[in-house]
Amino acid sequence: MPEDSAQVVIVGGGAMGTSTAYHLAQLGVTDVVLCERETLGSGSTSKSAGGIRAQFADEINIRIALISLLEFRNFEERIGTGIDFRETGYLFLLDSDDDVGRFRDAIRLQGSLGVLSTELTLDEVLELVPQLSTDGLRGATYCPRDGFATPEAVVRGYAAAAAEKGVRIKQGVDVTRIPVLGNKILGVDTTEGRIKTDTVVCTAGVWSKDVAALVGMNLPVEGEVRWMHYTPEAAGMPDVVPLTVDFSTGFYFHREGPGLVFGGREPTIEGVATQGTRRLPILEELPIQSSWWGYYEMSPDHNAIVGEATEPSRFLYATGFSGHGFQQSPAVGEHLAERVIGAKPTLDLSAFSAARFAQGEPREEPFVI
């Protein structure tokens, strides 16, 4: 088979991989090959609800969100592709005093960093979403600058902008082996032959564990199946409603065209519907037109795993986002690109290194849907 070469090989063509390719190109590194074993965005990215929020409890996630939100807001102007970013806000519904206390603490932290989140009364909740049932709720939080976008459009935009600068994007190309000599990567073997390189960036989502294993590294990522469902009608709901999350159950919904998209933690439509109709009774009246599923790439502490291996050197990774990878792709892609070229990163993500698990220092993100 023929042998190619590249300064950097990216494994995985979802939002994270294409963002990394784009940001590398922006930094002047265009001798890059991105390998996607299927089609761009065909993994978890295309199954995502597209939510984008700054309402996190971990300060690092808030900082990632602020950078990412800015890029999403300016995406069409900066990158040239419309992504249908809708600043509808995120509304968290809380049914326990403990959760209310934790979200209040987070609002203070978020506010200190410039996030416009606030606590709402239940009357204010009903002003936003009149069809909700507030039975059992103890409080709610809301941030009007949160929202959602179309994940496939983000991938297309990043990929097109990277390719225009010379990044080579290979679809339908699987990585089968990463030969290493001593502490140095020699290349990447693919179904189309070897690509000679000494730098690999792994952004393969739930499959990152398999890619890392090719260099003898353990990335503790497990796939968790999540279903989403689409109703073609919305039973008189306002045209604009926040992306609404019933925090304790994980049920969420947002408007999509004439209807709704909804999902949750339950593995069956019956389970999601049971949780959903309790909080949004009109769901019982709505037909399900389509359903689909994708993986959450779960880490042990529900925080991302981002960093660079010590053995071998020049193996970088970003995975384990536990449901918020798409929304963090702008800032984390930029971070990976900065690390590749040896620049001081805009964000210090050292606390997200995989080494934290071996060192017994997990970093919990409690606000996971």
Image: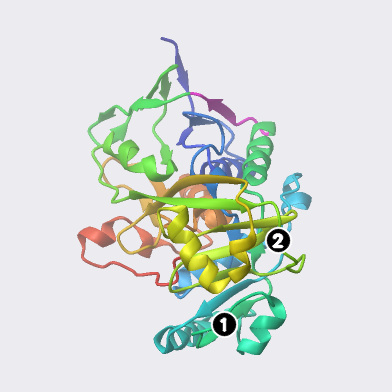
- In the rendered view of the protein, which quadrant contains the N terminus? top left
**x and y percent of residue 43 in the render?**
49, 40
Q: Measured from the top left, where is residue 63 in percent x and y?
A: 53, 69
* Residue 217 drawn at (x, y percent): 25, 43
- Magenta segment: does it hold 234? no
Residue located at (25% from left, 60% from top): 357
Query: Which is nearer the eye, 345 or 98?
Result: 98
How far is the residue under mark 1 from the one under mark 2?
Answer: 19 Å
Where is 247 relative to 201, above or below?
A: below
Label ID, residue 134: 1
Q: Nearer the viewer, residue 291 or 323?
A: 291
Q: Amino acid under label 1?
A: Thr
Mark 2 Cα-neighbour bin, 10 Å: few <14, some 14–19, many ≥20: many
Q: Is residue 171 left or right of residue 214?
A: right
Give how far across and how far down residue 361 sits, in percent.
26, 68
Disc 2 marks which amino acid?
Ala
Residue 90 as seen in the image, left or right of residue 135: right
Q: Which residues make up the magenta segment?
A: 165-172
Q: Which mark is residue 70?
A: none
Residue of label 2 = 234
Left or right: residue 200 versus residue 357 is right
Secondary structure under the numbered disc 1 in the rendered image? loop
